[in-house]
Image: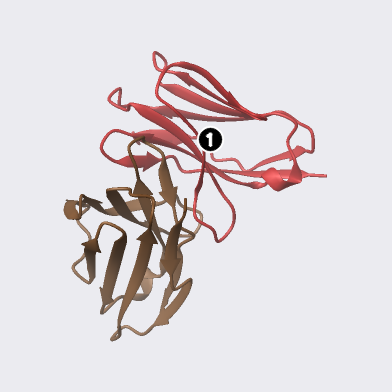
Amino acid sequence: QKEVEQDPGPLSVPEGAIVSLNCTYSNSAFQYFMWYRQYSRKGPELLMYTYSSGNKEDGRFTAQVDKSSKYISLFIRDSQPSDSATYLCALTTDKLIFGTGTRLQVFP
Amino acid sequence: DTEVTQTPKHLVMGMTNKKSLKCEQHMGHRAMYWYKQKAKKPPELMFVYSYEKLSINESVPSRFSPECPNSSLLNLHLHALQPEDSALYLCASRGAGYGYTFGSGTRLTVV
């Protein structure tokens, strides 16, 4: 079993939709939980990070962590074509471990 | 300055060449990382430097040689690479929190 599992996608949604991206993990030692966005041929860009169970909101983005279920989510409200990218969950103890990434396409 | 700068952006090298990738940050971060990313795959950790000392080597072949000359600079020296080493090489740094800042990467092609 991989340490971090992520829904592979790809996901194609219309502009304005609510997008839900999810990861599960197996190692309860993970302490910090992040979401990165990566555009084609660019480095990953940190969107959000949190270390506790619950919700964290930043504009159109909400990160949700459930440590008891070992489940993390990223919600994107009012999705825009500019949100089209690959989204990677990432978890850390002494190393940053990435999920496989979900490719999102938002069409006008 | 909140960026990690990587040079060159693109590199094509032959299997007998020696080249170096450079990474620079001026955020005062004391942990720096090299990652390798193949197409449609997530980044994979190669090396970790903490306070300018190599702390993690993820069993990377010796044809990749990292170097941290000072707290702002990280190099990756390349020698006798194979075509399968072609990938996007990413540098990252981390400060006091746990958010990692990535550079845009060097796209390496080995011919």
**Residue sitting at 33 percent across and 49 percent down?**
B28
Please tell me which residue lies in front, B13 or B31: B31
**Residue sitting at 44 percent across and 62 percent down?**
B5
Residue B56 appears left or right of A81: left
Please tell me which residue lies in front, A28 or A56: A56
Kind of residue at badge 1: Asp
Image height of B20 relative to A97, above or below: below
Chain A display color: red
**Residue sitting at 40 percent across and 17 percent down?**
A67
**Residue sitting at 28 percent across and 86 percent down?**
B16
- The percent position of residue B81, horizontal first and vertical second, equals 29, 76
Residue A81 appears left or right of A2: right
Chain B display color: brown
Whether residue A34 appears in this view of the structure is yes
- Quarter of the image for the C terminus of chain B: give it: bottom left
Specify the subunit that label 1 lies on: A
Image height of A2 relative to B27, above or below: above
- The percent position of residue B90, horizontal first and vertical second, equals 40, 59
Residue at which label 1 appears: A7
